[in-house]
Every structure is written in C-alpha cells, then in structure tokens.
Image (tube, grey):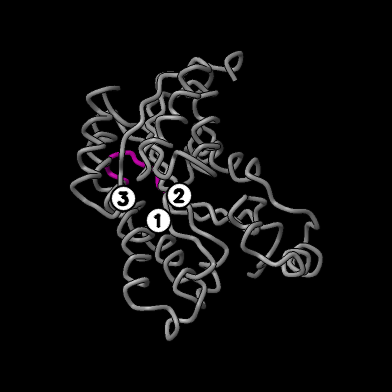
C-alpha cells in the first residue's frame, strides 16, 4: 500500500468506527491508500493500535482511539481527540455493530438485555457518532457519512434486521438534517460476504443455497465489493447522492 498512498482524498480525515478488524480495517486501508488520514476507532484499543500502526508504516497518518459507540461521552472524547490531531473530520464510516448469528433469533427468544445491547450499538451508536462529528464536518465545509446497514434490514424479520432497518431510517433522517451543513449521508447494505465471522457461523449448505438459488450473481461477495461502494459514496463522483442505501448483494433480495 505504501506505493499507492496519495490520491483523491489527500488531506481528508476519515473516522472509522469498528476500524480495527474486518470491514473497518478494509475501509481504513482503502481510505489511507487514497490519501486520507485515518482515525481507527474501536472498542478494542489494542487491535486498533495494530491497524493504525499498519497504516502508518504504509505511509499514511493514522491514530487509534478507544471508542465504544454506545457510550455518548466516549464518542465525544474520541471525536475531540481526532479533531485535535488532524484539525477536523471529513468522512465518517459508521461501521461498528453487533452482527453475531444470535441476533437473528426471534424477539421472543433473544433475551431483552441482548436486544437492548444490540440497539445501543447498531442504532444509538450511529446517532452518537453522527451527531458528534457534525460540527467538525460543518467547520470543514461539509463531508460524507457512510452507514453500514445489511440486506437483513430489508426483510427486518429479526432483532438484527430491525436494527439495520433503523440504520436505513437514520440515513434518511441525517441526510435531511445535515444537508444545510453540506454533509451527505448514505448507507451500504451488504449481502452475504466472505468474511471470517460469516463463514465461521453460517452452515455451508445455507451459504451455497443463497449463492446458487437466491442471488442473481452466483459468486460469494467479498470485502472488495463493499469497499468499492464505500469509495464511491465518499468520493466527489457521488456529490449528488445523499439519503440513499446502496445494496451490494448480488441481486438478493431484488424488488421494485
């Protein structure tokens, strides 16, 4: 990545929640390769430091911050620290979320404390981070927020699905509320992706059924597919796009 540092995001500051591993780390790598300074915000500070070190060694400017998105005060402190370090924030990726298979159980099965914990992270976490970053973005003349929803949010038949449906709603609400500050807000709904967590939890026969019988594109989705969507949404090319949710699902579910 060191040879690729520098590009259309030169000088921009990106705040990535859940940035230490998985999609968050992939987002950080891509943003850094395009020239952005990257704040790796994660509840696991040690893991965040490893990712920030990797980005720094590749030639980017990056810092790691502990950030439990469900904790409003902790989010505010992390955003303040990022502004102190880099002078502002231009891009927010609301990636942190709970997504274990257990959250796809029915509401009558999942214990209520788990439901609350899920919504505190997946829904209130998006509120906390978006509100905390607004002033810093407005001071820079605007910015871009990308929320990570899920194809489960289009069916919304489980606590997890409902939490991701709420993310789509927040995307519309914040796009409307933040528009006077020049802040665009969009979301991505990933489908079945070849992530370590997904592959460890899902039975292979279910994975095969989704790919072969339910998707229109018969291959497994990859992190690169989601990173490409993120890169578009934060780029100048998406300057006329806000309040939208981009499904990256291989055509499942597809409807008008």
- In what element is the residue under mark 2? strand
- In what element is the residue under mark 1? helix
Whether 210 is drawn above or below 82: the answer is: below
Whether 3 is drawn above or below 158: the answer is: above
- Residue lying at the far front of the rendered structure: 46
Asked if the stretch drawn in magenta spans residue 118, the answer is no
Cα–Cα gap, marks 2 and 3? 19 Å
Q: Residue at x 45, y 38 (%)?
A: 20
Which quadrant would residue 108 be assigned to in this image? bottom left
Per the image, the residue denoted by label 1 is 171
Horizontal relation, residue 28 to residue 84: left or right: right
Per the image, the residue denoted by label 3 is 69
| Label 3 Cα neighbours within 10 Å, binned few <14 / some 14-19 / many ≥20 | many
**Percent of width and height locating residue 206:** 72, 69
Q: Residue at x 23, y 30 (%)?
A: 81
Q: Earlier in the sequence, mark 2 or mark 3?
A: 3
Asked if the stretch drawn in magenta spans residue 184, the answer is yes
| Label 1 Cα neighbours within 10 Å, binned few <14 / some 14-19 / many ≥20 | many
Q: Which residues are magenta?
A: 179-185
Cα–Cα gap, marks 2 and 1? 6 Å
């Amino acid at each position: 990545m060191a040879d690729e540092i520098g590009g259309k995001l030169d000088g921009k500051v990106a705040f990535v929640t859940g940035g230490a591993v998985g999609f968050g780390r992939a987002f950080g790598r891509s943003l850094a390769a395009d020239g952005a300074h990257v704040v790796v915000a994660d509840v696991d500070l040690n893991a965040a430091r490893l990712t920030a070190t990797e980005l720094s060694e590749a030639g980017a400017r990056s810092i790691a911050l502990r950030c439990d998105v469900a904790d409003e005060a902790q989010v505010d402190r992390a955003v303040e620290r990022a502004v102190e370090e880099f002078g502002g924030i231009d891009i927010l990726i609301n990636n942190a979320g709970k997504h274990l298979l257990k959250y796809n159980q029915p509401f009558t099965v999942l214990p209520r404390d788990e439901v609350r914990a899920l919504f505190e992270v997946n829904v209130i976490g998006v509120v906390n981070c978006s509100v905390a970053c607004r002033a810093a973005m407005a001071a820079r003349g605007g910015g871009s927020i990308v929320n990570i929803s899920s194809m489960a949010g289009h069916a919304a038949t489980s606590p997890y699905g409902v939490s991701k449906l709420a993310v789509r709603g927040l995307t519309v609400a914040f796009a409307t509320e933040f528009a006077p500050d020049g802040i665009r807000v969009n979301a991505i709904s990933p489908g079945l992706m070849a992530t370590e967590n997904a592959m460890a939890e899902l039975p292979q026969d279910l994975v095969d059924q989704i790919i072969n019988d339910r998707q229109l594109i018969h291959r497994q989705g990859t992190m690169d597919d989601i990173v490409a969507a993120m890169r578009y949404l934060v780029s100048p090319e998406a300057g006329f796009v806000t309040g939208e949710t981009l499904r990256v699902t291989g055509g499942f579910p597809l409807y008008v």
